[in-house]
């Protein structure tokens, strides 16, 4: 019985690993409503702190129209 449970866990782990590795190459940001859009994210470190930093982020969505 223990071997059967181990087999189930092993098969589940392999399935999860295969799922993640097959999806990773296609994990791009895509907006179906704006497929040719250009989203730029700019971030600046404003201040260093003892546990990290404080940043300012700016995002631009450049929409090209014909």
Image (cartoon, rainbow, N blue to C red):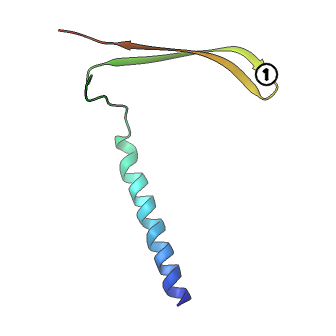
Residue designated by label 1: 49
Q: Tell me what residue is drawn at x 37 percent, y 48 percent.
A: 23
Q: Residue furthest top?
A: 66
- Residue 50's quadrant in the figure? top right
Which x, y percent locates residue 11? Answer: 44, 72
Is 8 located above or below residue 66 in the figure? below
* Image-based side of 51 in relation to 66, left or right: right
Residue drawn at 52 percent across, 90 percent down: 1
Q: Residues within 10 Å of mark 1 (few under 14, many from 20)?
A: few
Q: Residue at x 31, y 28 (%)?
A: 31
Residue drawn 39% across the image and 56% down it: 19
- The C terminus - image quarter: top left
Please identify the residue farthest to the front as the structure is shown.
33
Query: Residue 42 in the image: x percent, y percent?
Result: 52, 15
Question: Percent position (x, y) of residue 22?
Answer: 36, 52
Describe residue 60's horizontal placement relative to residue 53 as left or right: left
């Amino acid at each position: 019985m223990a071997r059967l449970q181990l087999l189930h866990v092993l098969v589940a782990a392999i399935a999860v690993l295969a799922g993640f590795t097959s999806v990773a190459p296609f994990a791009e940001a895509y907006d179906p409503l704006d497929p040719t859009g250009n989203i730029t994210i700019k971030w600046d470190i404003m201040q260093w702190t003892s546990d990290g930093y404080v940043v300012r982020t700016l995002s631009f969505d450049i929409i090209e129209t014909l």
